[in-house]
């Protein structure tokens, strides 16, 4: 091969373009995608040309957002009905756990709203420019993700603005997106996710929603630091305390003293003998000085008797005829919430105990419930405000969509219906042991259109009310709330 002088020079120029001199340097800012050994990662310095990374567990401005801002979410079902997510589900989007996700099937849409009206400024605190990050579970990506913000800064246009999406994932699943927020007056953010079954898991799984701020501030981001006063959003547990405590907590000396007393009391034998007037108890002083002493049963009895004599008349010989009537709950009638007039009167005159009485009572979601000694269980309550579109033709009438509610203990319907009560050593996780003998259902309109009747369908069980349909002579939307009263047995 023959190369003339011009050809040889061209070859040399090409070689120089490929190889660098033996001694040369690059600035860290000139190298993209590589962090040099010894580089300073100043994650909270927005003005430095040094490597500036986003570290999710430190820099995420949306961590625990459900506990700092007003966040709500609802799911629109294929039939048009809307179900609000409880606080447990809402917290999942902001807890830093990518292993959990909310699952959306085809035809379902999740709408999540984040408002900052609880902040002093009424908008996102301080500097809101940055990237909103959304992650999905493996290949369970939604069909569509929409993010829009409400801007209150006039120079940027007051109102709603859609944010543009950019897929930032480097995996095959393409399951992470970035939405750039360029608006300063950030008052509200709305996220919309559309379900998807065209993947391995047959659902769209939304795991985390994060915020990478251009100007992060350690005192504002939700992790403990030394830069500013902090607020805990979860319980703080410490298996062991080392060092001195200052401030409002116990001092180390008091902690050790308390621990010593507790350890000593734990070593005392279990006492089973019948007490006498001279039997002694351990008591603690009431002056918060951790001074302990002994007191006799007689002293305690005289104290209790003195309190009782000041409140109650001496017991008379009772004359009791008949049994007190068990109360019948009545919506809005608080005078019969615990016992009937007959029972109260007999109790005051010292009559003998009734044959049936309440052994447990409480509230569970919108339900008020009671359990009776005889085994009878009852509950009643009204749901929150809702609406029904009574628009489906049914003969000469129009009917709404099917509606039912879970009884206390139906956690598959809602975690708010969790129920647990222990009686005689047995734990009961639902109110009714079998299908209730009686269940009444009604709907109370709150204005506007009313209803002409309710169709009662099947579905009544120990965990759920029957299915009901609202009826009207004409098509209309009806606003109001459902009311129920059910009575059955817990044993």
Image (cartoon, rainbow, N blue to C red):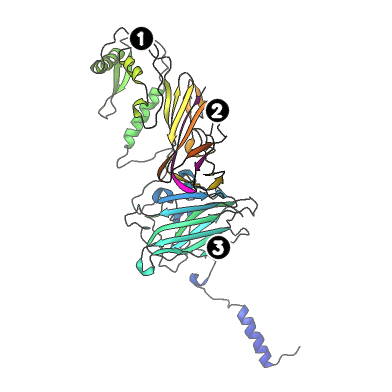
Q: Is residue 35 magenta?
A: no
Q: Position of residue 31 (x, y in %)?
A: 53, 70
Q: Is the residue under label 1 in contact with that under label 2 (CB below 8 Å)? A: no
Q: Check disc 3: other Cα within 10 Å, few if <14, some if 14-19, many if 20+.
A: some
Which image quadrant for residue 283?
top left
Q: Position of residue 42 (x, y in %)?
A: 43, 62
State whether residue 274 is above or below residue 325. Answer: above
Specify the segment rendered in magenta: 469-491
Q: Secondary structure at mark 2?
A: loop
Q: Quadrant of residue 46?
A: bottom left
Q: Nearer the viewer, residue 38 or 31?
A: 31
Q: Position of residue 20 (x, y in %)?
A: 59, 77
Name the disc covering residue 464, or none.
Answer: none
Q: Main secondary structure of the magenta part?
A: strand
Residue named by callout 2: 435
Can I make out residue 214 in this image? no
Tell me whether the residue at label 2 lies in contact with that at label 3, contact meaning CB atoms closer than 8 angstroms: no
Q: x%, y% of residue 314?
A: 26, 11
Q: Residue at x 26, y 26 (%)?
A: 286
Residue 320 circle label: 1
Whole-number angstrom distance, CA of label 3 to CA of label 1: 80 Å
**As drawn, 451 above or below 191:** above
Distance from disc 2 to disc 3, alpha carbons, whole Å, reads: 53 Å
Quadrant, the N terminus: bottom right
Q: State the residue in front, 10 or 103.
A: 103
Q: Residue at x 70, y 92 (%)?
A: 4
Sequence order check, earlier mark of 3 and 1: 3
Residue drawn at (45%, 55%) of the image: 60
Q: SS for tag 1?
A: loop
Mark 3 sits on what residue?
A: 168
Residue nearer the viewer, 76 or 417: 76
Answer left or right for 47 relative to 294.
right
């Amino acid at each position: 091969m023959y190369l003339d002088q011009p050809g040889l020079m061209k070859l040399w120029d090409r070689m120089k373009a490929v190889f660098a001199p033996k001694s040369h340097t690059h600035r860290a800012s000139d190298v993209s995608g590589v962090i040099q050994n010894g580089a300073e990662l100043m994650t909270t310095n927005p003005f430095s040309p040094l490597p500036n990374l986003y570290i999710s567990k430190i820099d995420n401005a949306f961590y625990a957002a459900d506990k700092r801002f007003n966040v709500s979410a609802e799911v629109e079902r294929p039939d048009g009905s809307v179900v609000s997510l409880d606080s447990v589900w809402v917290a999942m989007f902001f807890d830093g756990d990518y292993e959990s996700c909310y699952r959306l099937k085809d035809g379902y849409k999740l709408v999540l709203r984040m408002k900052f009206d609880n902040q002093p400024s009424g908008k996102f605190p301080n500097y809101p420019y940055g990237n909103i990050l959304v992650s999905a579970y493996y290949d369970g990506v939604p069909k569509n993700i929409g993010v829009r913000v409400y801007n209150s800064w006039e120079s940027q246009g007051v109102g709603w603005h859609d944010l543009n999406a950019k897929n930032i994932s480097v995996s095959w699943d393409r399951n992470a997106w970035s939405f750039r927020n360029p608006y300063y007056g950030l008052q509200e953010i709305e996220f919309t996710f559309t379900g998807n079954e065209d993947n391995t898991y047959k659902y769209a799984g939304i795991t985390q929603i994060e915020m990478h701020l251009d100007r992060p501030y350690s005192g504002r981001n939700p992790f403990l630091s030394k830069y500013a006063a902090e607020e805990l959003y979860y319980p703080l547990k410490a298996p062991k305390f080392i060092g001195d405590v200052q401030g409002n907590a116990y001092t180390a000396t008091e902690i050790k003293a308390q621990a010593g007393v507790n350890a000593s009391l734990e070593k005392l034998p279990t006492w089973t003998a019948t007490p006498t007037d001279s039997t002694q108890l351990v008591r603690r002083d009431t002056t918060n000085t951790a001074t302990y002493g002994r007191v006799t049963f007689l002293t305690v009895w005289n104290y209790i008797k003195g309190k009782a004599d000041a409140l109650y008349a001496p017991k008379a010989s009772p004359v009791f005829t008949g049994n007190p009537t068990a109360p019948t709950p009545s919506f809005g009638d608080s005078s019969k919430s615990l016992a009937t007039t007959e029972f109260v009167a007999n109790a005051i005159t010292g009559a003998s105990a009734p044959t049936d009485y309440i052994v447990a009572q409480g509230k569970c979601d919108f339900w008020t419930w009671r359990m009776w000694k005889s085994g009878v269980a009852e509950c009643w309550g009204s749901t929150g405000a809702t609406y029904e579109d009574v628009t489906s033709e049914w003969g000469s009438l129009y009917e709404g969509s099917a509606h039912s509610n879970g009884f206390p203990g139906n956690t598959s319907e809602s975690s708010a219906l969790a129920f647990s009560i222990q009686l005689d050593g047995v734990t009961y996780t639902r109110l009714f042991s079998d299908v209730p003998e009686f269940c009444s259902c009604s709907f109370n309109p709150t204005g506007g259109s009313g209803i002409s009747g309710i169709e009662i369908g099947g579905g009544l069980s120990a965990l759920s009310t029957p299915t009901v349909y609202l009826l009207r002579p004409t098509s209309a939307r009806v606003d109001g709330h459902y009311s129920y009263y059910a009575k059955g047995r817990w044993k």
